[in-house]
Image (cartoon, coloured by chain):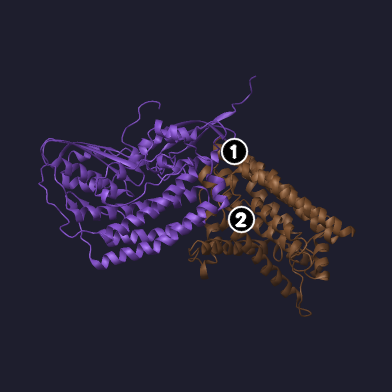
Amino acid sequence: MSSSYERIFDIPIGPQHPALKEPAMLKLKVDGEHVVGVDLDVSYNHRGIEKAAEYRTYIQNLYLIERICGICNVAQTLTYCLAVESLHGKEIPARARFLRIVAEEISRINSHLLWLGVAAHEIGFDTFFMHIWLDREITLGLMEALSGNRITSSYNVIGGVRRDVTEDLLSRIRKGLDDLEPRVKRYREIAINDRSILKRTQGVGILSPADAAATSAVGPTLRASGIKSDVRADDPYSSHDQVPFNVITSDGCDAHARIIVRLDEILESIQICRHCISKLPAGPILQRLPRRAPQGEAMSRVEAPRGELFHYICSDGSDKPYRCKVSTPTLANLPALVRMLTSKGRYVVNIADVPVILASIDPCFSCAARVERTGGV
Amino acid sequence: MWSAILPILQTIVFPGFLFLIAVSFLYEWLDRKIYAWMQFRAGPVLAGPVGILQPLADFVKLMGKEDITPAYADRRIFGAVPIMMVALIFTFWAVVPVTGSAGLVSFRGDVVFALVSMTFFCMLVFLGGFSSADRFSLLGAERAVLQLLGFEIPLMLSLTGVCIHTGSLSLSGIVSWQAENGWTLLGPQAIGFIIFLVAAQAELERIPFDIPEAEQEIVAGWLTEYSGRKLALIRLAKDMELVFVSGLAVALFLGGPVGPSPAGLEWLVYPAYFLIKLALVVAILAFIRGLFARARIDQMVSFGLRYLVPISLAQVAATILWRLA
């Protein structure tokens, strides 16, 4: 039977759209309110950072690398520093390793709170969004106290960290964490009990454990599908083996499980911070390393707030990297995203669910734009 | 001579058009302030004392902005919808009692007349979205009509309860019944009042039922292609609709403007009562807006038909039994 008009038509979510904070293109094929097909293009913001890194010295690259992503700048510089340090084959002082964990966990709390606010905004719950972002100010204050900057911290340097902490500063951080903890617990309670949040997130964006493994999802997206995988635990890169912590997982496999996993991770991060502050070893914070890196290759991986972050550096013995390669967690999560958006079976994805599902992987498209798209996906 | 001019003045100045526009801007400000207060924000602060002139400033600014009509839009319908929306609310405002038990116009059955306005408004929303020739507008228009399915029947039933209770089909009859019997309507019809507020929230397209213009999903829904003067008029119409629907709630459930007053001062005290009760209803609606996430369209319709309709039917049945007893 033929009809005089096409029932299925395209809805472009992007490159500019209120649900997206960065340029990306999500071409939805919709039948009424139901999504029947997805075409994803994320290469709107290729910045050539990897190429630019080849023209700068290792020290200069610190400031370039941290601008790959504003929110996970600590994780970016940490991964880069780990790679360069492993080129040199040098261990860094224990105190610096613990301070790196503190900075990393504070930035993880910051990133997860930011994400939670965005997720609340995507389901139209602006009051929740505003309240969460007010409390996010606490973590920004902590980051400023620790590094001197609210966002772009420049805290990690090759061979250690930039600034030492004083007893006064540590007590300020402790107080900030004490203020934050009851707030996060309250948000967790709301996220579990509020019916209007449950209605919009439960059963939405299903990613089965098998699919999560098959699409190589990373980070909270993977852990919310019940798979226990965390670089901090699997490959302790910065004295994480001396810090007791749990890898948070959930069996929900939906957008709601991703909210809960991230909220639990915030609470876990607060505990990690507290432990590191109380067990902070004495000693130097910086191991000076030569300007030129020995010839060779190095790779490093870090559990960034969004998932596993991977850096590769090839050195030709000069003071500039010969090749630098970055693989961000968002890129690893994109196949899982497409799987979620086209999930069939009991539940059909609505247009109204697309922003929630999109937000649930915590996308950072500008970080993911490492390749130019030339043809169809 | 005076008797000829008075109705014209009443229609144009008070309690007619100018009064309605002023009150609309005032209550948009109140709504925004309460919403901002719930979110630890300041809300409008710049224009006028405590930002009270901000809605007016927004309106004037929008009026001066570039007005674009999409190339493929149906120009006549697209252009007519904003004007018709404003005209619609102006017309129906005449039945809302502001200065006494009766509005500017009062007749038996004006409750039904007021109800028609809600459906009409929704039809205009659909026309506006449909004539825009835009994907997002089309989806928004489709959602607006679907949403009408969800809230229209409970809305009618909630009014039916009041009409049966007071034995009157006119707003003035309902208001004077409440004036005679004290505030005895809100108690037995409390469920009806709540249902009316929920349905009003859906009619006004506010969170949790701002589905036809859901920003994060379909940009601005049926409003996507509107800009400049047309958008200013639509926003004005939506503000006026807020006041109109809240005014209906005041008249139907909260006793309207009539209340105790020193003799001879009714012309001043009654409108004051009206404005205070109106502020109360707007505040409740603003609270609802701040407390929920947006529902999905299928959830909204099934919520309306599964819960609101049976509850309001039960309310009507109970009212009938009470009348027979």
The kind of residue on which mark 1 rests is Leu
Among the two numbered marks 2 and 1 on one chain, the one whose residue lies closer to the N terminus: 1
Which residue is at a point 56% across and 44% down the rendered structure image? B221
Indicate the colour of chain A. purple
**Quadrant of residue A8 within the rendered picture:** top right
Q: Which residue is mark 1?
A: B138
Q: Are marks 2 and 1 on the same chain?
A: yes
Chain shown in brown: B
Mark 2, Cα crowd under 10 Å, few <14 / some 14-19 / many 20+, is many
Q: Quadrant of the C terminus of chain B?
A: bottom right
Circle 1 — which element?
Answer: helix
Question: How much space separates mark 2 and mark 1, taking CA atoms?
Answer: 22 Å
- Residue B145 versus residue A202: which sits nearer the camera? A202
Total residue callouts: 2
Amino acid on which the number 2 mark rests in the picture:
Leu
Report the front residue among B287 and A17.
B287
Left or right of B322 in this view: B159: left
Badge 1 density bin: few <14, some 14–19, many ≥20, Cα 10 Å: many
Q: Position of residue A163 (x, y in %)?
A: 20, 59
Residue placed under numbered mark 2 in the picture? B236
- Residue most extreme to the right: B324
Q: Chain of mark 1?
A: B
In the rendering, which numbered label is found on residue B152?
Answer: none
